[in-house]
């Protein structure tokens, strides 16, 4: 698992702190299998397994530009955050990009899927901008989110490799 630690937090022009993540994992499966899982991730949630996530895809047909996911993520007991994601770029089986937004954060996520001799390298590049109530917690949010993203990639790898 690669985790670029030289990612830096900086402030976006509007004053919203920006968190940048560039992570990757090698998966012993072909790119098409990795893409298929990501394109219908709602069928496999929660990932990580201990996450409290409810996800719905609209429309439920093949993923394409404009496909949306509505997620409800449990932040704490009794506290759920809604996140809306929309596919902005898709190149099957090599790329899936989306914008996401919630009351507390917004940003962009790109999955790049490359064939390797070992199978596939899945790279996740994500930019997260924190809105007002979270601005002052940027360091803490970055640390917790980075750990969660690393765990999610590892569990996606394990899920895909278990299917082989």
Image: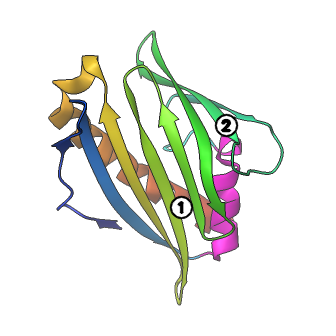
Q: Which of 25 and 96 is in front in this view?
A: 96
The color scheme shown is rainbow
| Total tally of numbered discs in the picture | 2
Which x, y percent locates residue 53?
Answer: 55, 30
The structure residue drawn at horizontal position 16% and vertical position 36%, both measured from the top left corner, is: 139
Which badge, 2 or 1, is on the more N-terminal residue? 2
Residue 34 falls within the magenta-colored stretch: yes
The structure residue drawn at horizontal position 70% and vertical position 42%, both measured from the top left corner, is: 67
Tell me the number on the disc at residue 158: 1
Classify 106 as above or below 119: above
- Work out which residue is located at the far top of the displayed protein and give it: 78
Q: Distance between the residues labelled 2 and 1?
A: 26 Å
- Work out which residue is located at the far bottom of the displayed protein and give it: 117
Which x, y percent locates residue 126?
Answer: 39, 51
SS of the residue under disc 2: strand
Q: Nearer the viewer, residue 77 or 9?
A: 9
Tell me the number on the disc at residue 68: 2
The structure residue drawn at horizontal position 43% and vertical position 68%, both measured from the top left corner, is: 25
Provide the residue span drawn in magenta: 29-44
The quarter of the picture where the C terminus appears is bottom right
Residue 154 lies in quadrant: bottom left
- Residue 49 appears in the figure: no
SS of the residue under disc 1: helix
Which x, y percent locates residue 138?
Answer: 19, 33
């Amino acid at each position: 698992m690669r985790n670029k630690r030289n990612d830096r937090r900086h402030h976006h022009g509007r004053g919203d702190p920006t968190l940048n993540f560039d992570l990757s994992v090698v998966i012993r499966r072909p790119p098409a299998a990795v893409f298929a899982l990501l394109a219908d991730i709602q069928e496999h949630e929660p990932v990580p397994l201990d996450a409290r996530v409810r996800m719905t895809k609209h429309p439920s047909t093949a993923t394409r530009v404009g496909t949306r996911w509505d997620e409800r993520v449990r932040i704490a007991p009794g506290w759920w955050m809604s996140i809306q994601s929309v596919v902005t770029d898709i190149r099957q089986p090599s790329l899936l990009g989306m914008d996401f937004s919630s009351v507390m954060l917004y940003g962009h996520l790109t999955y790049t899927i490359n064939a390797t001799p070992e199978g596939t390298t899945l790279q996740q590049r994500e930019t997260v901008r924190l809105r007002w109530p979270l601005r002052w917690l940027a360091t803490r949010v970055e640390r917790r989110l980075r750990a969660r993203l690393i765990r999610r990639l590892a569990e996606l790898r394990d899920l895909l490799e278990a299917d082989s």
